[in-house]
Amino acid sequence: MSVSNAIDQPAVRPAAARNIARTFWQTLGRRLRRDPVSILCFGFLVAIVLMALFAPWIAPADPYQVNMLQRLQPPGTEGFILGTDELGRDLLSRLMYGARMSLFMGLAPVFIATIIGGTLGVVAGYAGGWVNTAIMRVMDVFYAFPSVLLAVAISGSLGGGVRNGLIALSLVFTPSIARVAESVTVQVRTQDYVEAARATGAPAWRILMTHVLRNVAGTIFVFSTSLVSVSIIIASGLSFLGLGVSLPEAEWGMMLSSMRQSVYLAPLNSVLPGVMIFVTSVSLNLLSDGIRSAMNVKG
Amino acid sequence: MTLAATLAAQESAQESAQESEQAPAPAVAPPPLVQVENLRVRIKTPDVDVTLLHGLNFSLNQGEVLCLVGESGSGKSITVRSLLRLLPPGAIVEGSIIVDGIDILALKPAQLRAVRGPLIAIAFQEPATSFDPAFTIGYQIAETVRAHEQVSWADATRRAQDLLELVQVPSAKRRLDAYPHELSGGLRQRAMIALALSCRPKLLIADEPTTALDATVQIQVLLLLRELQRELGMATVFVTHDVGVACEIADQVAVMYSGRFVEMGPIERIIDAPRHPYTAGLLGSVVTPDVPGARLEPIPGAPPDPTALPPGCSFEPRCRVARPACAQAMPAFTQIAPLHQVRCVLAASGAAMGDIEK
Amino acid sequence: MTILSPQSDYDTAPDRGGPRQPMLIVQGLRKHFGIGGGFNGKAAVVRAVDGVSFDVPKNKTLGIVGESGCGKSTTAKLLMQLIRADEGEIILDGDPVAMSRGVSLRDYRRSVQMVFQDSYASLNPRLSLQDTVAFGPRATGIPQAAAMRRAHDMLRRVGLAPEVFASRLPHELSGGQRQRVNIARALAMNPRVLILDEAVSALDKSVEAQVLNLLQDLKQELGLTYLFISHDLNVVRYISDRVMVMYLGKVVEIGDVKDVFDHALHPYTRGLLSSRPSMNPRQRRTEPPLSGDPPSPIDPPSGCRFRTRCSFAETVCAEREPPLASLGLDQQVACHAVTPGSGHTQASAGEGASQ
């Protein structure tokens, strides 16, 4: 081998001589597939989502059909697989329909908050200076209140209903997402590759889109995922207090609330909505933990 | 005869390599402090399955410095970390590591913790990994002393101060109350060496401890290490990628490539007459003051992927003097002179590398 | 070289000042960082770069050396306009930068590019190599296809075959390969000046030698001017034509690389030079040439900043700051001990301290 072509050698003989160039997402997917807990949680969530989507077709009974003669039937009763609630409505059907509202109240506010909070945080983090101070201090004011208290206060002043609950929850999650977005953006902004991009004289929006967003999106996404379960729980709490969804709409939190008087008469029936909330939020949290640790790779 | 046996026969514990060449061999040689045989390390996780060390043998007497030299990824760090079993999860270690009569690989976790410090201590490249940012330097050194010895706080703190003075930290008493971030890079590095020395280890492992330092500070730390090592009579395994650093501190050098030793011997011999083409290339890559502007002659290419090593000699694809036989089988690690071993088919011919190329 | 042909997508800015005009003239560059403020009210000032002047001839390499914290990297960032200087003027090929009549910041940035030390941190982990290299040209308005073509040309030029590497991600490369990508990215802007901030320091020696050879070739082929910042004096000696020694934000010695390395006049330069490992196990260093670390740039010593570590320090060194004085044909030194008439006891002998 001659010495003169030494300069060209690394091209011919790469140290990492793998032909399979995996993208970041492929690596992530491969790691998640090897994590049994994540797979299990993912399975649960898919089942719940399918149940919610197809509730009108698969629900065994009308969830709003009141039957005072069949009140608080235990699970396993003929015709009512999971029994009935305090007004004799089929519990399984109500849980299926309730999943729609609960999932909506879990996902929608977090989605809205991620868009708003993420944008505010990234802008604040990248711009720095007084822009950062202005945005982040406002966020801090919101952040100073406990989230449940803030949600109750906002929806209390706006009045009940799904729309106001949605607004309240979005406002509750925006500051925390903005804070996470800001801190990762500040980290990314000081990286050499952003400096190098600035050195080309590229405009700020182009650097943001190409170099910053791609590197902060993952972290923000994982954090937001972990908020979905919180959102479900707070939404349930609002319904429980009568501030969220109104009767006779099926929603897990409200079902829990309305059956709490019956907890001594039919304990199993009463805790079922709670079990659903619990399983869904635990699955979401574990899955988001799984994603977080799977993302913890170089590049 | 293995190198270990030769070393043991020729050197008494306290003498440096140069002196021992003239010194008469003692009648009964003490056993070497460190005896590593057929050390193999394999990392097996769901993501990777790769063998990083392919059977290393070496031994080290008290008071000696062995330098492991090689490019990044050659297995230097893994080798020294195996001595303390500080390996990533999924690591499978085979072979035997005996330090001062203790079989390191057979120790239970609790016993291993007891060994770390009084027997073997480690100094890293980055002091941040050794110190907790939340506690003062003095507290952390004293705490380490107390973890291994039954001494009072006052005594431990006094010992911490002595140690800082030993490693030439100026105004040591005041620095006891300093937090790690309050020290400059050079001082932090010294404080870390003090921490490593706090339990008077018999074996110090230094993993590129001067690489992050300025040349002016690096030479100070190297001189300090040399002095401490002479005074305390400890053995040192020193990892570096810088041949210049090895020249300043090593008695013996082991050149590593792709998880194997390719050449091992006294530093003077290795520098004067390297017998493995990789060693020669490594020395040729060092930019020396003598050649401004002249074209450098680096080793072409890059080290092979450890998951796909070539079938024969790992260095064959980059070797300037490779023969057809080199692609067939890995050459044996052969002794070509007392204390000097080489893993190359050409070394047996007796010529130094420079002569082969001409 | 198709890349350099006039038909290429955009060309190097023309050589306006002629070969005698220095590519870069820097005058009185100053940057102080304010830190803290705190409760005691008194904000500390880090004098990172404190009045630095030098020039770089066309197609030459100026090496900048010094210990960490001496202001080398801040100087690089100031020259890159990544941070704004408090004071000072930069003249690119005869035109003052960002002045009403001179070159615009945009054109300047295209002409001056930088290669960073940390090859991990300086590449976006989510961006393929071709996208990384093409980003700069895209940002200056070159169409996507042309920018991509240019990225491939540049990758090939630094020794990375685009067929193999163009769509790889940074973590799939070795350190040396990543540093080649960094060089390709800088070259894609078609610069005239390349600032290399510890660009080979993190590489293995054999890879370092490969990259140094590449840099030498590129300099010849593309007619580049280099500012080579490094703490490795042997490498600086190897690649530089001129060398500048910095200490705590000041230039202490500057001159032709051969003069400075063979006949260093400043005691700091000599200490720095003899701190290099001996490369001879039979003649090891026995005494550290310089003791201690450099003092903090927050509150530098009065007069000569080096005096606290200098064995020739006298009262005059604490009283007055030594100016950068010309000694020899092309060598300037800031030291009382070697400047005639400074009042230092060794100064009358002229070069007393240089023995």
Image (tube, coloured by chain):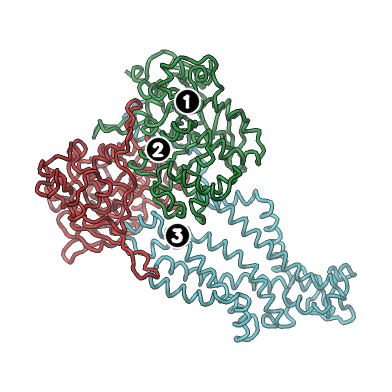
Chain colours: A cyan, B green, C red
Q: Please check whether the numbered discs 2 and 3 fall on a single chain.
A: no
10 Å crowding of disc 1: few (<14), some (14-19), many (20+): some
Asked whether residue C4 is in view, the answer is no
| Mark 2–mark 3 distance (CA, rounded to whole Å) | 37 Å
Chain letter of the residue beneath label 3 in the structure image = A
Give residue B296's position: percent from left, percent from top.
30, 32
Chain letter of the residue beneath label 1 in the structure image = B
Chain letter of the residue beneath label 2 in the structure image = B
Above or below, comparing residue A100 to residue B237 in the picture: below
Q: Nearer the viewer, residue A1 or B105?
A: B105
Q: Quadrant of residue C280?
A: top left
Q: Which mark is residue B14?
A: 1
Which residue is rendered at x = 53% and y = 63% of the image?
A220
Residue B121 shown left or right of residue C163 in the figure: right
Marked residue nearer the N-terminal end (1 or 2): 1
Amino acid identity at mark 3: Gln
- Number of the front mark, 2 or 3: 2
Amino acid identity at mark 2: Leu
Would you name the residue on which mark 3 appears? A187
Give residue B343's position: percent from left, percent from top.
47, 21
Asked whether residue B327 is in view, the answer is yes
Q: Which mark is residue B224?
A: 2
Above or below, comparing residue B124 to residue C84 in the picture: above
